[in-house]
Image: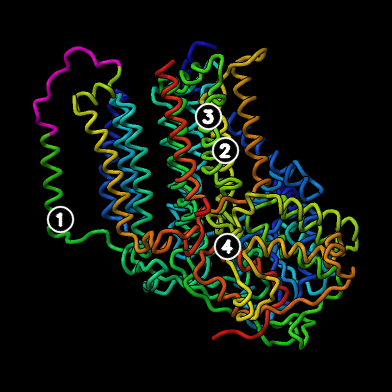
C-alpha cells in the first residue's frame, strides 16, 4: 500500500457512517459484556440493546428555565462530530474526503467536544450538570494541548498533513513504534474527548451524572451514542496516524484498517472498568507538567530524526 | 455555480449569526452565535482553497468562544450572565457607528478595482500567503508568538494572590508546597 | 402494540432504579440493590436516569415531600415502590416490573402529566447571586446548593447546605432529615446511649464497612472494584463467610497495590487525631482518604474474621460497635474542598449512623 488513497464519491458516506455505527455498537456490546460479567447478571451481551429499548420508550423531559436549543445541540453534537472525523480516515485504498490538511481538520473537530459537552451541561440549568460541564473543560485544558502536539509528531515525520500520506509514510516501521509517547497521549485525548473511563468525572456519580444528570429518553441516547461513536472514530483515526494504516499481511488493506481500529477500540473500552478516574484537579498538573513537556520532547526527537535522516 | 451559491449562503449565515450576537438574551447564546458566524467564515475560506487557514479559523474560534462563554459566565459581576440579559450597551450611538463601518467596509470591498488573475495559484497557497504577508519577518513573527505566550504566563504569575513564599515558606525550603488542595504531581 | 410490547420487554431487562434509603433501613436498601443487580437492573444516578423509585423505609414528614418531588422528576414510564422490610424487596421489585410492563397504564400516566411543566414555573426572574471572597481571595458569586438527602453513594438522610464558589465548598451546614421523628429518625435503630451503634452481628458490621468502601470506590470511578466490594458485602450478609473472606482479601490487595488510586486519594482531607477528637469523630479515621479507605477494608476484614483478625490478635467475631457520626463534623471536614473531593471525604468517614444533633 505505497500509494495514497483516492477520494470516492459522497454517495459512499452512508457506508462510512454505517461502519462507524457498527464499531460503536460493537464497543457498546463489549462494554455491556464486561459489565455483565463483573455484575454476574443474567443477561450480558443484551445490555446495550435493552438500554436502547429503555431510552426509546422513555419520555424526554425538560427542566425549569432550560436553554433547550443549546441543550439539544450539545447532546446531539457529539455524534455529528464523530461522523465528521471519519470522513478523512482512509479505509485502505479509499477515502471519503482527501483533504490536504486532514490532520488539522480532525484537530478542529475534537475541539468541538468542548462546546458540545459544556453546552449539554449548561443547557439544563441544573447545578450538577453545570459542574459536570466545567469539569470537562478543566480536563480539556489539560488534555487538549498535549493532544495537539501528539498529532504534530506523525505529521512532521510524514512531512504532510494529508492523512493518506501520513499512513503511506509508515512503510516498514509504524509510527507507534518510534513515537510511543505521542501515541499514548493521543489515546488519552481520545478517551478524554469521549468522556470515557478515567476521564468520566464530567458525568460522575458524585454529581448525580454531571452533564447527563437531567437527560432522559432519546436525548440521553444521542449523548451516549455520541460518546461511543467518538471513541470509535478516535480509534479509527489512530490507524492511519500511528498504526501503519492498511498495511499488513494476507488481508486486504481495508480489512486491516478495521481490524486495527477494532483492536484499539476494544482496549479503550476495557480500560474503563479497570481504572479509577483521573480527577481534573490532579490531572491538570499532570497535563501541563508531565504530558506537555513529554510530547514536546517527542516532537523534537521526531523532527531531529526527520531532518537528520 | 454551486460554489458561488454556497459561498453567498455562508456569507448570509455569517452576517445573520453576527447580528444574532446582539439580539439574543444570554451570554451562552451570544458566544455561540459568534462561534457559528466564525465557522461560516471559516468555511468560506475553505471554499477559497485556503484549506489550512480555513480549518484553523474554525478550530481557534470554537475554542475561543467556548472559553469566552465560560469566562463570561464565571466573572461577570453579580452574575447576570446566568439569567437573561440585554446584550447591547449604548445602542443609540453604537448602532449607527457599527452600521456605518459595516457599509463602509462592504462598499470598499465591492467597489475596489480588484486586479484580474494573472497566472495560476501556486501549489501551496498557504505557504505563498504566509510569505506574502510576512516575507522576511517570519522569524520575528515566530518569536513574537512565544514572547506573547510568556507575557500571558508572567501576567498570571504576577497577578496571583499566593506567591511562592506562601507556598514554599520564606526560605523556599519547604519540601512540599502548602496548597489548599494538593496537585497531581506531588508538589 | 406488538412493537411497544417487545420494546417494553427489552427495556425491562435493564431498568434503572433510584434507591432512597430512609435512615435506619440499611439492610432493606442493600437487599433491594442486590436483588436488582441479579435481575440485570442498574442503579440510577439521578431521577432523569431512573425508571423505578425505590423508597426503603417509611419517609418522615421532611423526607416525604422530597420523595414526591423526585417522583415528579422521573421521566416515565415509571414505577414507585415502598419497601419497608428486607423480606418484602423481591415482591416489590416484581410489582415495579409489572407496573412498567403495563403500557396502557404508563400511557395514562403520561397523558395525565402532559401540559404540566417540569416543576413550577419560576416566579419572575431568578434572583441575582451575591458575591463573597473565595479561598484565593477572589470575589466570587455564591451558589447555595443542597447536597442530599438523595444522591448516589451518599449517607442516608444527610443534608449539607453548601455555599459554593464555582464547585468549591466555601462552607456548609449539616442536618439530618426527620431528625427526631420517631423510629425512622436520624439515629439508626439500635443506637445506644454510649454513642455507638451495635449492628446485629459481626458479619453485618463487616458488610456495612464493605458497603461504605464500595461507595467510596464508586465515587473514585473504579467500577470493577466497586462491584467486587458489593459482592463481598452481599456474601457476608448471605452468610457465605469463607468465600467472602477470600474475596475481601483479594479486594484489599488490589486496592493497596493500585498506585493510581493512591495518587488520587493521598493527601485528600487529612484529619490529625486532635482534629478528630475535637469534631467528635472516631480515632481510627486518622490520616487522609487513602488511609481511611484501607482502614475501612481492614475493619471489614477484622469483623469478618479473616487473616487480619489473626494478625491483629483480636478474637474472631468480637466486633466493637460503630460510633455515631455528628453531622456538624461532616460539614466541618468538607469546607474548603471542591465538590468531588468533598464527596470522597464524606464517603471516607465510614458513616454507620448520623447523630441527631445539627449545627445551627
Horizontal side of residue A232 vs B96, given as left or right: right
Q: Residue A237 — which label?
A: 3
Q: Which residues are magenta?
A: B109-123
Horizontal side of residue A122 vs A246, given as left or right: left
Which of the 4 image quadrants contains residue C209?
Answer: bottom right
Label 2: how many Cα within 10 Å (few below 14, some 14–19, many 20+)? many
Letter of the chain that mark 3 sits on in the rendering: A
Mark pair 2, 3: CA separation: 10 Å
Q: Which residue is mark 1?
A: B94
Mark pair 3, 4: CA separation: 38 Å
Q: Looking at the picture, how far across and down is residue C230, in whole percent? A: 77, 58
Q: Looking at the picture, how far across and down is residue C117, in whole percent? A: 51, 66
Q: In percent of the image, x 58 and y 18: which residue is there?
A: A246
Q: Nearer the viewer, residue A72 or A36?
A: A36
Q: Main secondary structure of the magenta part?
A: loop
Q: Nearer the viewer, residue B74 or B41?
A: B74
Q: Which residue is mark 2?
A: A231
A305 part of magenta stretch = no
**Front label number (3 vs 1):** 3
Amino acid at each position: 500500500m505505497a500509494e495514497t488513497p483516492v477520494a470516492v464519491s459522497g454517495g459512499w458516506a452512508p457506508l462510512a457512517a454505517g461502519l462507524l455505527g457498527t464499531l460503536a455498537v460493537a464497543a457498546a456490546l463489549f462494554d455491556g459484556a464486561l459489565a455483565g460479567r463483573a455484575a454476574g447478571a443474567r443477561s450480558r451481551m443484551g445490555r446495550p440493546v435493552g438500554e436502547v429499548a429503555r431510552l426509546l420508550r422513555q419520555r424526554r423531559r425538560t427542566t425549569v428555565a432550560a436553554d433547550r436549543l443549546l441543550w439539544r445541540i450539545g447532546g446531539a453534537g457529539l455524534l455529528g462530530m464523530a461522523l465528521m472525523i471519519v470522513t478523512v480516515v482512509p479505509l485502505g485504498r479509499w477515502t471519503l474526503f482527501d483533504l490536504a490538511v486532514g490532520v488539522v481538520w480532525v484537530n478542529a473537530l475534537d475541539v468541538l467536544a468542548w462546546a458540545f459537552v459544556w453546552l449539554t451541561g449548561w443547557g439544563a440549568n441544573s447545578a450538577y450538570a453545570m459542574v459536570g460541564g466545567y469539569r470537562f473543560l478543566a480536563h480539556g485544558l489539560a488534555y487538549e494541548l498535549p493532544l495537539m502536539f501528539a498529532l504534530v509528531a506523525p505529521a512532521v515525520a510524514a512531512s504532510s498533513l494529508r492523512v493518506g500520506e501520513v499512513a503511506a509514510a509508515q512503510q516498514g516501521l509504524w509510527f507507534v513504534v518510534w513515537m510511543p509517547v505521542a501515541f499514548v497521549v493521543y489515546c488519552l485525548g481520545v478517551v478524554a474527548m469521549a468522556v470515557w473511563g478515567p476521564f468520566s468525572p464530567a458525568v460522575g456519580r458524585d454529581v448525580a451524572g454531571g452533564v447527563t444528570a437531567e437527560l432522559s429518553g432519546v436525548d440521553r441516547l444521542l449523548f451516549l451514542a455520541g460518546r461511543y461513536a467518538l471513541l470509535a472514530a478516535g480509534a479509527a483515526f489512530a490507524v492511519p496516524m500511528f498504526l501503519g494504516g492498511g498495511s499488513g499481511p494476507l488481508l486486504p488493506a481495508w480489512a486491516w484498517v478495521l481490524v486495527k481500529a477494532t483492536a484499539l477500540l476494544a482496549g479503550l473500552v476495557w480500560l474503563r472498568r479497570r481504572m479509577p478516574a483521573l480527577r481534573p484537579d490532579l490531572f491538570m498538573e499532570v497535563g501541563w507538567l508531565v504530558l506537555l513537556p513529554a510530547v514536546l520532547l517527542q516532537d523534537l526527537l521526531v523532527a531531529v530524526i526527520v531532518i537528520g535522516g | 455555480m454551486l460554489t458561488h451559491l454556497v459561498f453567498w449562503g455562508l456569507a448570509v449565515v455569517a452576517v445573520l449569526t453576527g447580528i444574532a450576537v446582539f439580539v439574543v438574551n444570554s451570554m451562552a447564546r451570544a458566544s455561540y452565535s459568534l462561534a457559528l458566524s466564525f465557522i461560516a467564515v471559516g468555511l468560506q475560506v475553505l471554499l477559497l482553497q485556503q484549506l489550512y487557514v480555513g480549518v484553523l479559523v474554525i478550530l481557534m474560534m470554537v475554542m475561543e468562544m467556548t472559553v469566552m462563554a465560560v469566562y463570561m459566565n464565571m466573572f461577570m459581576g453579580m452574575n447576570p450572565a446566568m439569567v437573561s440579559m440585554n446584550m447591547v450597551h449604548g445602542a443609540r450611538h453604537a448602532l449607527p457607528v457599527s452600521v456605518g463601518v459595516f457599509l463602509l467596509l462592504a462598499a470598499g470591498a465591492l467597489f475596489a478595482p480588484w486586479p484580474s488573475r494573472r497566472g495560476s495559484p501556486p501549489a501551496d497557497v498557504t505557504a505563498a500567503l504566509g510569505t506574502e504577508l510576512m516575507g522576511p519577518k517570519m522569524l520575528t513573527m515566530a518569536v513574537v508568538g512565544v514572547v506573547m505566550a510568556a507575557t500571558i504566563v508572567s501576567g498570571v504569575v504576577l497577578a496571583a494572590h499566593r506567591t511562592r513564599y506562601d507556598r514554599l515558606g520564606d526560605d523556599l525550603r519547604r519540601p512540599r508546597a502548602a496548597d489548599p488542595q494538593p496537585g497531581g504531581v506531588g508538589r | 402494540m406488538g412493537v411497544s410490547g417487545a420494546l417494553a420487554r427489552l427495556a425491562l431487562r435493564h431498568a434503572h432504579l433510584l434507591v432512597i434509603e430512609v435512615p435506619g433501613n440499611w439492610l432493606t436498601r442493600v437487599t433491594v440493590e442486590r436483588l436488582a443487580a441479579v435481575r440485570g437492573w442498574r442503579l440510577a444516578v439521578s431521577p432523569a436516569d431512573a425508571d423505578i423509585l425505590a423508597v426503603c423505609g417509611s419517609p418522615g414528614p421532611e423526607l416525604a415531600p422530597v420523595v414526591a418531588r423526585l417522583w415528579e422528576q422521573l421521566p416515565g414510564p415509571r414505577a414507585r415502590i415502598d419497601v419497608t422490610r428486607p423480606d418484602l424487596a423481591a415482591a416489590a421489585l416484581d410489582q415495579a416490573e409489572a407496573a412498567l410492563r403495563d403500557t396502557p397504564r404508563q400511557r395514562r400516566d403520561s397523558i395525565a402529566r402532559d401540559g404540566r411543566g417540569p416543576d413550577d414555573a419560576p416566579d419572575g426572574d431568578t434572583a441575582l447571586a451575591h458575591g463573597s471572597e473565595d479561598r484565593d481571595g477572589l470575589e466570587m458569586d455564591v451558589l447555595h446548593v443542597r447536597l442530599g438527602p438523595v444522591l448516589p453513594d451518599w449517607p442516608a438522610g444527610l443534608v449539607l447546605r453548601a455555599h459554593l464558589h464555582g464547585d468549591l465548598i466555601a462552607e456548609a451546614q449539616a442536618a439530618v432529615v426527620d431528625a427526631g421523628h420517631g423510629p425512622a429518625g436520624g439515629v439508626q435503630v439500635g443506637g445506644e446511649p454510649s454513642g455507638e451503634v451495635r449492628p446485629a452481628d459481626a458479619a453485618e458490621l463487616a458488610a456495612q464497612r464493605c458497603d461504605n468502601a464500595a461507595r467510596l470506590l464508586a465515587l473514585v470511578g473504579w467500577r470493577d472494584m466497586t462491584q467486587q466490594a458489593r459482592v463481598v458485602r452481599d456474601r457476608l450478609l448471605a452468610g457465605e463467610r469463607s468465600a467472602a473472606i477470600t474475596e475481601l482479601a483479594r479486594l484489599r490487595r488490589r486496592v493497596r497495590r493500585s498506585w493510581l488510586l493512591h495518587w488520587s486519594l493521598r493527601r485528600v482531607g487529612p484529619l490529625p487525631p486532635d482534629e478528630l477528637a475535637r469534631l467528635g469523630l472516631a480515632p481510627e479515621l486518622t490520616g487522609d482518604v487513602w488511609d481511611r479507605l484501607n482502614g475501612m477494608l481492614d475493619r471489614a476484614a477484622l469483623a469478618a474474621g479473616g487473616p487480619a483478625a489473626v494478625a491483629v490478635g483480636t478474637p474472631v467475631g468480637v466486633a466493637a460497635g460503630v460510633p455515631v457520626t455528628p453531622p456538624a463534623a461532616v460539614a466541618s471536614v468538607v469546607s474548603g474542598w471542591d465538590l468531588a473531593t468533598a464527596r470522597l471525604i464524606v464517603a471516607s468517614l465510614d458513616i454507620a449512623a448520623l447523630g441527631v444533633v445539627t449545627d445551627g
